[in-house]
Image (cartoon, grey):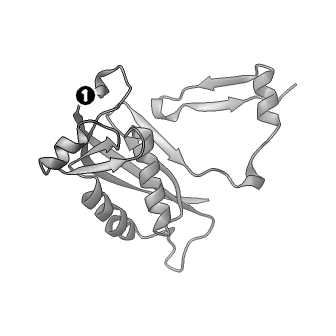
């Protein structure tokens, strides 16, 4: 399978409701999003997709909808005040976690016809959330991993980069 990744930087603010940590306060991030596209075949140009197509479509949407805006849950009590003041906000039905924002970007990218396989949102230099396409039903392993987990043969190993934590399952008896 071929894959290409476009990296886009944008700035946003948010806060999390029903959260005890520092993210319960309004604050901002200089985010980096990695949009990965995949394909079994290359097009007539020898590409999965042209990087400029990603930039012109997805980066333009990010700049218009999310960049330099407060991403807030629809239930956030600060929302009416910020709207009244004319502050730029993007309203979400969920808490605007890095995971939810990664999924939002993934969904938009897919809706524009891109063969997106994963979106990684780096909220900080040390924290990344990933939303990826679910494998096709025929590609899913159904019983072996569950059995391995029940028998205690699952392990987690970390690579040198923390964003590459890998869940490995031993199926050996």
**In the foreground, 79 or 57:** 79
Image position of 85 (left or right of 143): left
- Rendered residue at 31%/42% (across/down): 72
Q: Position of residue 163 (x, y in %)?
A: 47, 34
Question: Which residue is most to the right?
Answer: 173
Q: Secondary structure at mark 1?
A: loop
Q: Position of residue 124 (x, y in %)?
A: 31, 34
- Is there any visible trace of residue 35 in the rendered image? no
- Rendered residue at 53%/64% (across/down): 115
Q: Which residue is mark 1?
A: 25
Above or below, 61 relative to 94: below
Position of the N terminus by quadrant? bottom right
**In the foreground, 137 or 73:** 73
Image position of 61 (left or right of 81): right
Disc tally is 1
- Rendered residue at 40%/50% (across/down): 34
**In the foreground, 129 or 107:** 107
Above or below, 19 relative to 30: above
Residue 122: quarter of image: top left
Above or below, 85 relative to 146: below
- Is there any visible trace of residue 122 in the rendered image? yes
Image position of 4 (left or right of 167): left
Question: Which residue is most to the left?
Answer: 85
Q: Position of residue 69 (x, y in %)?
A: 22, 48
Position of the C terminus by quadrant? top right
């Amino acid at each position: 399978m071929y894959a290409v990744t476009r990296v886009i930087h944008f700035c946003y603010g948010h806060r999390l409701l029903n959260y005890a940590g520092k993210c319960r306060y309004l604050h901002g991030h200089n985010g980096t999003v990695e949009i990965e596209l995949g394909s079994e075949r290359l097009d007539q140009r020898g590409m999965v997709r042209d990087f400029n197509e990603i930039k012109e479509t997805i980066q333009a949407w990010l700049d218009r909808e999310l960049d330099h805006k407060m991403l807030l849950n629809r239930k956030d009590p600060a929302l009416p005040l910020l709207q009244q003041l004319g502050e730029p906000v993007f309203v979400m039905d969920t808490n605007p976690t890095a995971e939810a924002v990664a999924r939002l970007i993934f969904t938009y990218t897919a809706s524009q016809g891109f063969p997106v396989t994963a979106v990684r949102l780096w909220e900080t230099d040390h924290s990344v959330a990933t939303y990826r396409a679910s494998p096709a039903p025929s590609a899913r392993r159904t019983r072996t991993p569950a059995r391995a987990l029940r028998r205690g043969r699952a392990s987690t190993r970390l690579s040198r980069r923390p964003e590459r934590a890998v869940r490995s399952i031993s199926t050996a008896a």
